[in-house]
Amino acid sequence: MDSTGAQAMAKLPGKLEIQSMVVGALAGPLNSLVGVLNGALSDLVFTLQAVADKRKEEGN
């Protein structure tokens, strides 16, 4: 290995830093997916509650 290669190797991040970068890269999209699914589930619950409330009013 020449000095240019050694300098390039010296600039590489450490093992823990690489692991945290990978986890962060994976966690970001997963957190977004969870947020989207949570929002859709909340919308469904609110819709079902509104239908139940409407049926209850119509029943009285």
Image: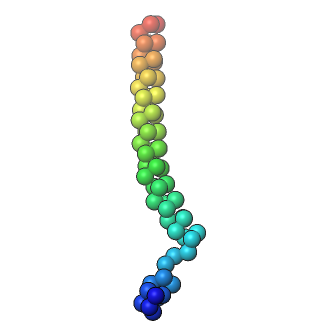
Q: Count of labels shown?
A: 0
Q: 22 or 37, which lies in front? A: 22
Name the residue at 43% across, 52% down: 29
Name the residue at 46% across, 49% down: 30
Instruction: Name the spot of residue 36 as percent of width and height, x first.
Output: 41, 42
Is 1 situated left or right of 20 in this image? left
Q: Is residue 11 visible?
A: no
Instruction: Name the spot of residue 14 as percent of width and height, x first.
Output: 55, 75
Q: Quadrant of residue 17?
A: bottom right
Taking the view exactly as shown, the residue that stands out farthest to the bottom is: 3
Q: 59 or 13, which lies in front? A: 13
Taking the view exactly as shown, the residue that stands out farthest to the top is: 59
Instruction: Name the spot of residue 34 as percent of width and height, x first.
Output: 47, 44
Residue 24 lies, with reference to residue 55, above or below; the image says: below
Taking the view exactly as shown, the residue that stands out farthest to the right is: 16
The chosen color scheme is: rainbow
Q: 28 or 45, which lies in front? A: 28
Name the residue at 45% across, 33% down: 41
Taking the view exactly as shown, the residue that stands out farthest to the front is: 1
Q: Is residue 33 visible?
A: yes
Instruction: Name the spot of residue 58 as percent of width and height, x first.
Output: 41, 9
Name the residue at 46% across, 34% down: 42
Residue 1 lies, with reference to residue 46, above or below; the image says: below
Q: 2 or 56, which lies in front? A: 2
Residue 46 lies, with reference to residue 17, above or below; the image says: above
